[in-house]
Image (spheres, rainbow, N blue to C red):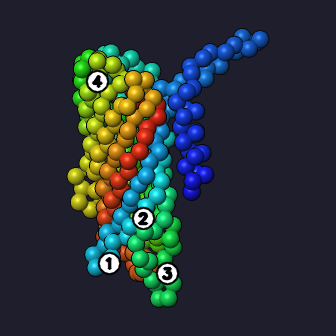
């Protein structure tokens, strides 16, 4: 596990240091390296839980990582009164079961804990030299296992599209060095996707942040480890992580 954490951390640092450069070969063909503003990522410690009625809470602890990048917003200037933000992202968490294992007959559940989320979010709003407020929507697909208990027991992934609100407070008018708070919810009691993310700058450079995130997902056909195959009940998934973010927030 420690080796995985070190590899992820080094990859994020390397991604943040990439520069935008144009090269031209002898034939006149031009090549552009990816700029650091295109790529950002997190590495964090995380705790995940799955709740079922009448069953002890499933708890897992582990390491979280995220790789993300703006698509259209990477090319849009940050000084316009109309602000635009978009991001494609992939979240992966892996760890160990921390709660006592459940049993299906004499077989204990697995000790591995994972969650996987990917999606695309797009927002637009009002921008000033001091602050910005944007609203939009996120399209996300997710699943999570805590031991042998699964959030989406009857499907591979759960798809949701929550509404999002993003607020920014810019330090000394910087379009990059800023506090960013994002919150989202799809207001659906059966397949709920709600949460928030807070990014706090810790350096005058725009490459290092402290990040916190809370994710809340519900699914009507989840699968506890001691239910056996093809038996489902409503499940509630919670995930919290705290760590560092490397790269531009746009």
Q: Mark 2 packing: few (<14 Cα in 10 Å), some, or many (20+)? A: many
Mark before the other along the chain sequence, 1 or 2? 1
Label 2: state its secondary structure: strand
Which mark sits nearer the N-terminus, 4 or 3? 3
Across and down, in percent, residue 161 comes to: 33, 47
CA separation in Å, label 3 and label 2:
15 Å
Q: Please tell me how crowded label 4 is: few (under 14), some (14-19), or many (20+) other residues with Cα within 10 Å.
A: some
Question: CA–CA distance between discs 1 and 2?
Answer: 15 Å
Residue at mark 3: 108
User: Residue 55 shows which numbered tag?
Assistant: 1
Image point (39%, 23%), residue name? 204
Dot 4 or dot 2: first in sequence order is 2
For label 1, the SS is: strand
Q: Which residue is mark 4?
A: 170
Please tell me which of labels 3 and 1 falls first in the chain.
1
Question: CA separation, marks 3 and 1?
Answer: 15 Å
Dividing the picture into quarters, in which one does residue 243 lie?
top left
Report x, y in % for residue 78: 35, 19
Q: Is residue 99 above or below residue 127?
A: below
Q: Secondary structure at mark 3?
A: strand
Secondary element under disc 4, as helix, strand or loop, is strand
Above or below — where is 243 with respect to 123? below
Circle 3: is it few (<14), some (14-19), or many (20+) Cα within 10 Å? Answer: some
- The answer for how far apart the CA atoms under marks 1 and 4 are is 46 Å
248 vs 173, left or right, is right
Quarter of the figure that contains the N terminus: bottom right
Q: Residue 209 location, x and y as percent?
A: 40, 35
Q: Which mark is residue 213?
A: none
- Sequence-wise, the earlier of marks 3 and 2 is 2
Q: CA distance from mark 4 to mark 2?
A: 36 Å
């Amino acid at each position: 596990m420690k080796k995985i954490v070190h590899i992820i951390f080094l990859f994020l640092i390397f991604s943040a240091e990439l520069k935008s450069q144009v090269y031209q070969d002898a034939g006149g063909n031009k090549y552009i390296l990816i700029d650091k503003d295109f790529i950002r990522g997190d590495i964090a410690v995380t705790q995940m839980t799955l709740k079922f009625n009448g069953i002890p809470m499933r708890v897992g602890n582990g390491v979280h990582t995220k790789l993300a990048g703006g698509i259209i917003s990477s090319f849009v200037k940050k000084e316009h009164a109309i602000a635009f933000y978009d991001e494609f992202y992939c979240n992966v968490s892996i760890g160990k079961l921390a709660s006592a294992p459940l049993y299906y007959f004499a077989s204990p559940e697995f000790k591995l804990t994972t969650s996987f989320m990917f999606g695309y979010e797009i927002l637009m709003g009002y921008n000033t030299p001091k602050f910005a407020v944007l609203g939009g929507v996120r399209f996300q697909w997710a699943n999570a296992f805590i031991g042998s208990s699964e959030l989406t027991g009857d499907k591979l992934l759960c798809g949701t599209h929550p509404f999002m609100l993003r607020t920014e407070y810019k330090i000394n008018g910087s379009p990059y060095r800023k506090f960013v708070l994002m919150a989202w919810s799809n207001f659906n009691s059966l397949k709920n996707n709600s949460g928030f993310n807070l990014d706090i700058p810790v350096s005058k450079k725009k490459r290092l942040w402290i990040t916190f995130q809370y994710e809340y997902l519900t699914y009507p056909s989840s699968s506890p480890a001691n239910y056996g195959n093809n038996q489902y009940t409503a499940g509630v998934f919670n995930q919290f992580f705290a760590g560092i973010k490397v790269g531009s927030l746009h």
